Amino acid sequence: MSRIFNFASGPAVLPLPVLEKARDEMLDFAGSGMSIMEMSHRGKIFDAIIKAAEDNFRRLMGISADYAVLFLPGGASQQFAMIPLNLLPPGRSADFVDTGAWAGKAIKEAGIVGKTNVIWSGRAGNYMSAPAPSELDFDPAAAYAYICSNETIGGVRFAEFPEPPSPLVADMSSDIMSRVIEVGRFGLIFAGAQKNLGPSGLAAVIIRRDLAERVPATTNLFFRYRTHMPEPSLFNTPNTWAIYIFKLVTDWVAENGGVSAMQKRNEEKAGRLYQVLDASPFWRPCADRASRSIMNVAWRLADPGLEDKFVKEAKAAGMDGLRGHRSVGGLRASLYNAFPPEGVTALIDFMREFERRNG
Ligand SMILES: Cc1ncc(COP(=O)(O)O)c(C=O)c1O
């Protein structure tokens, strides 16, 4: 077996012990003679798994009983629609901070439901920064305020979160559990699972319970958060496999010191890579310094003609997923929780050698 260093932005690398455990438990889960995927979502075994997944998540992120934790299908994109369908009633507007492609998609979906008020946009600066709280002027009458905490494509993050007068809604798909946050400052947090939590197609949603009551009567049952409460929700047959892997991933995070330990490790990994990018004009890191993501590091080469060569040679050296998103080009290394520090060392060594040969 040979595992590569996987820098993909999502679906992304999972912790090796998680994959090994899933493999070992695949054919006969805990003496049941079945795999998790083959058994009832209403049985005792799966009930214990979904409850453990929720408990792990609550403990790791410090989520109080005032919040519901929901495991919903449709990944993060379904949340772009569900949020306005629940929280944006007729005649109201919501504030948005436009930090890039993912915030843009959420703005577009909300615009189908109601009025969107873009209070800040990074478009003129090619989405290379996120605003400081002091740059934002929120509407006190807004139904909610929306941000994307980490823009996966641009490699830009909120270093500090704003405190709007209305409930703060955040897409944390690409940085959930990568740094310590205070859940109590948010009305709703959601994340597609495929970066820091597990397989794709699953969204983890943390919603302040009172907000779920605001849903207009015109919203279909499935798309109401309230329908999926109280937890664990079995309104539909959930993605049992994805929730099982989520449980294993959160076990792994807990065994490895929790979110603060992840944050320390992530800051070290990204810090070492940014140091190399800053050290020579051969490399051109994209994001403004104050907004640099510790999950997705995006950069260009001074000679963009060399980028293709870089990707190909890196792949031959056992490092995949380094091509930037197709909408922006360039290079990107995604360094999620499960990405090992040795992979950053390998990349840095490769970069130094590449620069020596091509600089
Ligand atoms: C920040 C962010 N939000 C939303 C999404 C969309 O997620 P999904 O494909 O699960 O709908 C992505 C996907 O990469 C993302 O990076």
Image (cartoon, rainbow, N blue to C red):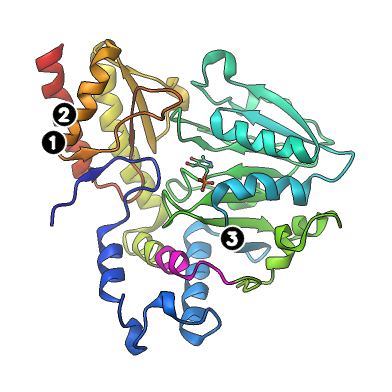
Nearer the observer, 20 or 181? 20
Q: Mark 1 near mark 3, Cβ–Cβ under 8 Å?
A: no
Task: Please report the residue visible at 31 percent of the width from the left and 50 percent of the height from the top.
Answer: 13
Q: Which residue is mark 1?
A: 317
| Quarter occupied by residue 341 | top left
Residue 291 in sight in this render: yes
Q: Amino acid at mark 3?
A: Leu
Q: Amino acid at mark 2?
A: Glu
Would you call the spot at circle 2 few (<14 residues within 10 Å), some (14-19), or many (20 or more)? some
Between the C-alphas of marks 1 and 2, the distance is 6 Å
Task: Please report the residue visible at 45 percent of the width from the left and 20 percent of the height from the top.
Answer: 288
Q: From which residue to which does the magenta span run?
A: 237-247
Look at the picture and state if 274 lies above or below 246.
Answer: above
With 350 as the anchor, is 267 left or right in this view?
right
Residue 204, given in percent of the width and then of the height, sits at 55, 57
Would you call the spot at circle 3 few (<14 residues within 10 Å), some (14-19), or many (20 or more)? many
Q: Earlier in the sequence, mark 2 or mark 3?
A: 3
Ligand 1 closer than 8 Å to the CB at disc 1? no
Between the C-alphas of marks 1 and 3, the distance is 38 Å
Q: Secondary structure at mark 3?
A: strand
| Quarter occupied by residue 23 | bottom left
Looking at the rendered image, the quarter that the N terminus falls into is bottom left
239 part of magenta stretch: yes
Q: Which residue is mark 2?
A: 313
- Of all residues, the one furthest to the right in this rendering is 91
Q: Which residue is mark 3?
A: 72
